[in-house]
């Protein structure tokens, strides 16, 4: 079995909590983050339930300036570093620590305000587009925490942060770094809300993954980061190992720009690659955190893929999208954090919103958060354009 990568810290910000403990409390209580959109006005989509992070990220972040995404990312990254007992105010660059961030919208929210001011008021405020680029959060985090080794930004839509974690693991295994910060961030924007609504895949009553009456997805925002380490490095400094990344796989099926292959071929192959990488059979997976967006196409395809990999021995499975909404580029990292917390707490998150599984979907998601004997957990991420990532975490 290949040498696993240790997870020594988690940082998390979602619509149901500003810390991992707050988030898990909401999961345990079955409390959804879906609610009214207050971040900006949207005449056509303002009535849709949205998983918005309440409060001001800029007020919690230590960055002097930045986009909403930058502040969310920095705050979550700081939590992860603190949890890992790593220096959060370094005086020098660490040449053996790096960062990989998954993102998609970057500073789009602020750019929309820039454009609105330009059109309506003929006002040019360049500070609003100063942090527009998708890599802005990566640069801000690298500078803030003195990460001088490998630095990269991954943008593969909704699989971005999952691929960022896999990339960071590769960097550690290559010997290029001892410590990597990896995760992702996305903030709500008018572009994404109106864009998904134009595809007619946003649910008026909130997402209900795998339910027979599901009407689509719900958008959300947030950030999550993991501190990943070479296991010897973690042991030498006496760090607590929360979990290990024991396998991962990535594929691209290129079936359609916005729809997965109906049989789930891409994510099926990603799961198979992850299992091979981990050196374990499917029967050794105890829990699957499904991508489960609540759209008709996604849920059917993913269910077909799971059935293709696991047959009749399907592990405990659930989607947590109704808690956080679909956080796009941040989703993979948020759900990776959920898997690690599930392993630590020996509990499986409930598939919130599920009333009756659609006929033809041959999986039985866990309806309510429950205790379970867990040693391994798998999380799946599917992105527009056909990019798929599957990751496996273990306690040993």
Image (cartoon, rainbow, N blue to C red):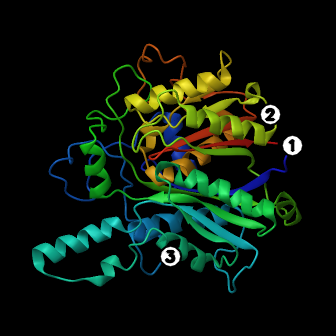
- The vertical placement of 173 against 278, above or below, is below
Query: In this figure, which residue is indicated by the disc labeled 1?
Result: 1
* Alpha carbon separation for disc pair 3 and 2: 42 Å
Q: Residue at x 36, y 38 (%)?
A: 217
Q: Nearer the viewer, residue 342 or 25?
A: 342
| Image location of residue 76, percent across then percent down | 54, 62
Label placed on residue 280: 2
Instruction: State which quadrant residue 287 falls in.
Output: top right
Label 3 vs label 2, nearer the camera? 2
Q: What is the quadrant of the C terminus in the image?
A: top right
- The vertical placement of 102 against 111, above or below, is above
Mark 2 residue element: loop
* Alpha carbon separation for disc pair 1 and 2: 8 Å
Instruction: For the residues labelled 1 and 2, say whether their Cβ atoms are less than 8 Å apart.
Output: yes
Q: Nearer the viewer, residue 54 or 212?
A: 212
| Image location of residue 122, percent across then percent down | 13, 81
């Amino acid at each position: 079995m290949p040498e696993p990568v240790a997870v020594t810290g988690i940082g998390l910000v979602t619509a149901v909590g500003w810390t991992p403990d707050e988030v898990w409390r909401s999961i345990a209580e079955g409390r959804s983050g879906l609610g009214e959109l207050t971040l900006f006005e949207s005449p056509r989509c303002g009535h849709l339930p949205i998983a918005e992070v309440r409060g001001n990220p800029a007020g919690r972040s230590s960055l002097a300036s930045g986009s909403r995404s930058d502040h969310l990312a920095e705050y979550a990254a700081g939590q992860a570093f603190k949890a890992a007992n790593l220096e959060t105010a370094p005086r020098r660059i660490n040449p053996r620590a790096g960062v990989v961030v998954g993102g998609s919208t970057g500073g789009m929210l602020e750019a929309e305000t820039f454009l609105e001011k330009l059109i309506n008021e003929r006002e040019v405020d360049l500070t609003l587009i100063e942090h527009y680029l998708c890599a802005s959060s990566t640069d801000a985090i690298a500078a803030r925490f003195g990460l001088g080794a490998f630095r990269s930004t991954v943008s593969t839509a909704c699989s971005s942060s999952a691929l960022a974690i896999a990339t960071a693991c590769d960097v550690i295994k290559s010997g290029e770094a001892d410590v990597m910060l990896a995760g992702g961030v996305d903030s709500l924007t008018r572009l994404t809300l109106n864009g998904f609504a134009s595809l007619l895949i946003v649910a008026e009553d909130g997402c209900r993954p795998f339910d027979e009456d599901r009407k689509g997805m719900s958008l959300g925002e947030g950030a999550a980061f993991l501190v990943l380490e070479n296991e010897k490095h973690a042991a030498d400094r006496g760090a607590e190992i929360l979990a290990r990344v024991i396998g991962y796989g990535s594929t691209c099926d290129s079936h359609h720009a916005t729809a997965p292959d109906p049989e789930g071929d891409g994510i099926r192959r990603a799961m198979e690659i992850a299992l091979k990488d981990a050196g374990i059979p499917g029967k050794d997976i105890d829990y699957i955190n499904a991508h489960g967006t609540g759209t008709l196409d996604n849920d059917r395809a993913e269910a077909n893929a799971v059935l293709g990999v696991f047959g009749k021995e399907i592990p405990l499975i659930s989607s947590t999208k109704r808690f956080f909404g679909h956080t796009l580029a941040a989703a993979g990292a948020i759900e990776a954090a959920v898997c690690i917390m599930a392993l630590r707490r020996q509990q499986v998150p409930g598939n919130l919103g599920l009333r009756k599984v659609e006929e033809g979907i041959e999986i039985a998601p866990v309806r309510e958060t429950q205790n379970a004997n867990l040693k391994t957990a798998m999380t799946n991420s599917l992105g527009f354009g056909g990019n798929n990532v599957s990751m496996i975490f273990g306690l040993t």
